[in-house]
């Protein structure tokens, strides 16, 4: 069964807030399998002032952070004991990161994360960030859960 999450539901699950909340909505969530999130990249993002003034490009590390936030959302939805909004999710590792396309103002970044495995509080995912169906970045990302 798939469902969606709006920004208010996302804010209940993640502690991040503007300007560091990088998932605007979840358009598909299949707990324990896959999550597809969206980041609308706008010209008024604070990082565009310095990266780069003559050619605004979303920093690759922020694309990875957006993917990591999407893994936290899928983790929270994949285990009933984690989805109460009181846990904190940490980026635990990034492997095989590759950047294939620049992301700029006006782009809609689709964040596709797929569950691979987990052991105790460490979860692994295969992640892709795409714009218009073109791969912008990909990596294997590990998410650690600090259960409260």
Image (cartoon, rainbow, N blue to C red):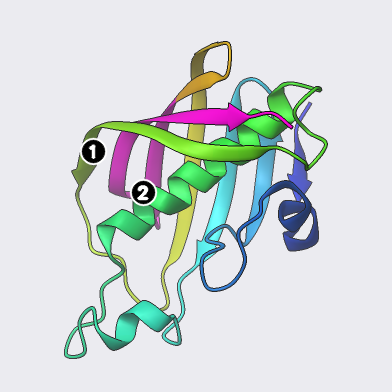
Residue designated by label 1: 97
Residue designated by label 2: 64
Percent across and percent down for residue 70 are 55, 43
Residue 138 is a magenta residue: yes
Residue projecting furthest to the front: 148
Q: Secondary structure at mark 1?
A: strand
The residue depicted at 78 percent of the width and 52 percent of the height is: 12
- Magenta-tinted stretch: 125-148
* Disc ID at residue 125: none
Mark-to-mark CA distance, 1 and 2: 8 Å
Give the quadrant of residue 128: top left
Residue 6 is a magenta residue: no
Q: Secondary structure at mark 2?
A: helix
The residue depicted at 62 percent of the width and 62 percent of the height is: 24
Percent across and percent down for residue 46 are 41, 82
Percent across and percent down for residue 126 are 40, 27
Q: Decide which of 56, 11 is in the foreground and name it.
A: 11
Residue 45 higher or lower than 100, as above or below: below
Percent across and percent down for residue 90 are 50, 38
Label 1 neighbour load within 10 Å: few <14, some 14-19, many 20+: some
User: In this rendering, does residue 84 appear at all?
Assistant: yes
The residue depicted at 34 percent of the width and 31 percent of the height is: 93
Give the quadrant of residue 33: top right
Residue 9 higher or lower than 143, as above or below: below
The residue depicted at 58 percent of the width and 38 percent of the height is: 89
Quarter of the image containing the N terminus? Answer: top right
Residue 39 as seen in the image, left or right of residue 139: right
Q: Decide which of 115, 100 is in the foreground and name it.
A: 115
Q: Earlier in the sequence, mark 1 or mark 2?
A: 2
């Amino acid at each position: 069964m798939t469902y969606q999450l709006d920004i208010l539901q996302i804010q209940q699950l993640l502690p991040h807030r503007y300007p560091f909340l990088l998932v605007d909505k979840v358009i598909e969530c299949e707990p324990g399998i896959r999550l597809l999130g969206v980041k609308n990249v706008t010209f008024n993002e604070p990082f565009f002032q310095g990266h780069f003034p003559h050619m605004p490009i979303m920093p690759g590390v922020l694309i990875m952070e957006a993917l990591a936030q999407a893994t936290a959302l899928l983790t929270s939805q994949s285990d009933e004991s984690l989805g109460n909004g009181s846990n904190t999710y940490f980026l635990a590792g990034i492997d095989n990161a590759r950047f294939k396309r620049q992301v700029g103002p006006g782009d809609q970044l689709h964040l596709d994360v797929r569950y691979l495995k987990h052991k105790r509080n460490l979860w692994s995912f295969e992640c892709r960030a795409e714009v218009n169906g073109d791969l912008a970045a990909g990596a294997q990302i590990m998410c650690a859960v600090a259960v409260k």
